[in-house]
Image (tube, coloured by chain):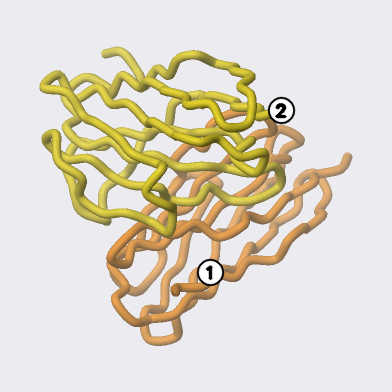
Chain colours: A yellow, B orange
């Protein structure tokens, strides 16, 4: 059973650029959630995908968008990057949707915007 | 929005017991998780509470009181490796994390 994997592990982008981060969910999991974690803070919920559809969204602007594929892997896309988008982006998968199931986290993608 | 409150930092000595509290707004509550996060690593699941009472798992226990909007994580027989951030996450219509409690265990 493979765990949650994210790519790339580190990324440096320039302000105004666009970025795509990828996540492969744990085998048998159909739900993926994305979080943004600034240094010294708890993770902030961006959105959740269940069976290829968005299933809940946090307080992030529309320039944060996502996709989930038939194999349940997922992408996080961020347009028009701002310096404040520099953070650790975490993906977590769970075996079902809803807000009451344990999530398994990937190691994250550290995004730096310069 | 839903606020999750945790102490920012706590210190304890090896072998001791420490209790980390978490309070939240009760409206729309749908379960509470505790995660451990070592510096530079991803959070790992510790416990889940949806009903009132104590859930015990080895050295770690978690307690929930839904009417009071209160939970705590109890760590017994502290070890140096328990130095980490402990995150309380609450399920409402969405998942909300607290800012985490940084625990430092000293010899």
Label 2: chain? A
Q: Quadrant of the C terminus of chain B?
A: top right
Q: Nearer the viewer, residue A101 or B61?
A: A101
Classed neighbour count for the residue bearing mark 1: other residues with Cα under 10 Å, few (<14), some (14–19), many (≥20): many
Classed neighbour count for the residue bearing mark 2: other residues with Cα under 10 Å, few (<14), some (14–19), many (≥20): some
- Residue under numbered circle 1: B4
Instruction: Tell me if residue B107 comes above or below residue B49 in the rendering.
Output: above
Report helix, strand or loop for mark 2. loop
Rounded to the nearest whole Å, what is the CA distance between mark 1 and mark 2?
31 Å
Which mark is nearer the camera, 1 or 2?
2
Instruction: Tell me if residue B106 comes above or below residue B2 in the rendering.
Output: above
Residue A64 position within the rendered picture, expressed as x and y whole percent measured from the top left = 40, 41
Q: Nearer the viewer, residue A35 or A30?
A: A35
Report helix, strand or loop for mark 1. strand
Q: With A32 as the anchor, is B64 left or right in this view?
A: right
Instruction: Tell me if residue A41 comes above or below residue A69 in the rendering.
Output: below
In which quadrant of the rendered view does residue B82 lie?
A: top right
Q: Quadrant of the N terminus of chain B?
A: bottom left
Disc number at residue B14? Answer: none
Residue B88 position within the rendered picture, expressed as x and y whole percent measured from the top left = 51, 58
Q: Nearer the viewer, residue A49 or B15?
A: A49
Residue B11 position within the rendered picture, expressed as x and y whole percent measured from the top left = 82, 54
- Residue under numbered circle 2: A114
Q: What residue do we see at 52% from left, 37% from top?
A: B43
Question: As drawn, which residue projects farthest toward the right?
Answer: B107
Q: What residue do we see at 80% from left, 46% from top?
A: B104
In which quadrant of the rendered view does residue A37 lie?
A: top right
Q: With B53 as the anchor, is B72 left or right in this view?
A: right
Q: What residue do we see at 20% from left, 53% from top?
A: A98
Q: What residue do we see at 58% from left, 51% from top?
A: A42
């Amino acid at each position: 059973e493979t765990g949650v994997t994210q790519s790339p592990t580190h990324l440096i982008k320039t302000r105004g650029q666009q970025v795509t981060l990828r996540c492969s969910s744990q085998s048998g999991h159909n739900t993926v959630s994305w979080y943004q974690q600034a240094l010294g803070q708890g993770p902030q919920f961006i959105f959740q995908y269940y069976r290829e559809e968005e299933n809940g969204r946090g307080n992030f602007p529309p320039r944060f968008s996502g996709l989930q594929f038939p194999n349940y892997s997922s992408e996080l896309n961020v347009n028009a990057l701002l310096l404040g988008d520099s953070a650790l982006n975490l993906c977590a998968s769970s075996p079902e949707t809803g807000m009451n199931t344990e999530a398994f986290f990937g190691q994250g993608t550290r995004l730096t915007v310069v | 929005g839903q606020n999750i409150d945790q102490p920012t930092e706590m210190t304890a000595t090896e072998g001791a017991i420490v209790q980390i509290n978490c309070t939240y707004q009760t409206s729309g509550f749908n379960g509470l998780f505790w995660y451990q996060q070592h510096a530079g690593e991803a959070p790992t699941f510790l416990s889940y509470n949806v009903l009132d009472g104590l859930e015990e798992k080895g050295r770690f226990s978690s307690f929930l009181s839904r009417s009071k909007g209160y939970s705590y994580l109890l760590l017994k027989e502290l070890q140096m490796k328990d130095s980490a951030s402990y995150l309380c996450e609450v399920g409402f219509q969405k998942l909300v994390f607290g800012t985490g409690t940084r625990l430092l265990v000293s010899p």
